[in-house]
Image (spheres, helix red, strand yellow):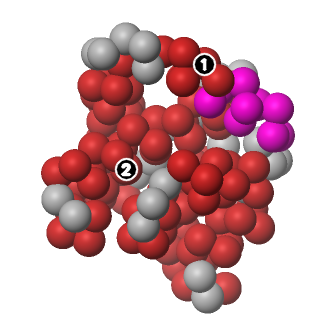
């Protein structure tokens, strides 16, 4: 897949920021991602201990939905559901090049910049980088 342009990321992030005025928006975004990408949601949930518990899982799923919206906007259609095979392939590819976060930055610099600017913690960044790489391959 081609790189998601910075303008797309800025537009989606601006829209998401505006939607955050609705106190229910984050819950809806999390539910949307879990329903659209159930295996990716299960993967994130399985990382609960690494992510610091339930709150970390919710942050990861929320930001994964932002990535999903960026890819969808760029593609002009929904991203195919990310399955365990796509996550495994992304992990193997990233493993071959050393670092999943660096690999994500090489593949999708605008999205990696969003994650670096909006997400605290190496574990959370790593999980989102893997999800982003899998989405990028699914394009």
Instruction: State the residue in front, 55 or 39.
Output: 55
Q: Are marks 2 and 1 in contact (CB under 8 Å)?
A: no
Q: Which portion, as a residue range, is magenta?
A: 5-13
Q: Residue at x 46, y 43 (%)?
A: 63
Q: Quick check: 126 left or right of 38?
A: right
Q: Is residue 9 magenta?
A: yes
Query: Which of pointers 2 and 1 lies earlier in the amino acid sequence?
Result: 1
User: Is residue 24 toward the left or the right of residue 91 in the image?
Assistant: left
| Element type where label 1 sits in the image | helix
Q: Is residue 77 above or below residue 60?
A: above
Image coordinates for residue 137, horizontal then vertical, percent: 64, 54
Residue in the picture at 76% in, 67% down: 106
Q: Position of residue 27 (x, y in %)?
A: 27, 25
Placement of 33 over or under 48, stated as above or below: above
State the residue position of label 1.
Answer: 15
Instruction: Tell me the residue at 45%/60% (across/down).
Output: 120
Q: Secondary structure at mark 2?
A: helix
Residue 122 in the figure: left or right of residue 23: right
Magenta stretch mostly in which secondary structure? helix
Instruction: Name the residue carrying label 2.
Output: 60
Position of 118 relative to 133 (above/below): above
């Amino acid at each position: 897949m081609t790189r998601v342009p910075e303008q797309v990321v800025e537009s989606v992030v601006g829209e998401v920021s505006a939607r955050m005025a609705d106190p229910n928006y984050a819950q809806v975004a999390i539910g949307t991602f879990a329903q659209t990408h159930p295996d990716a949601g299960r993967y994130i949930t399985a990382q609960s201990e690494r992510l610091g518990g339930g709150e970390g899982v919710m942050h990861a799923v929320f930001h994964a939905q932002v990535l999903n919206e960026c890819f969808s906007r760029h593609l002009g259609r929904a991203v195919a559901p990310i399955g365990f095979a796509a996550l495994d392939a992304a992990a193997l590819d990233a493993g071959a090049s050393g670092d999943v976060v660096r690999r994500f930055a090489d593949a999708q610099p605008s999205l990696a910049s969003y994650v670096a600017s909006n997400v605290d913690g190496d574990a959370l960044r790593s999980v989102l980088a893997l999800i982003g790489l899998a989405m990028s391959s699914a394009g």
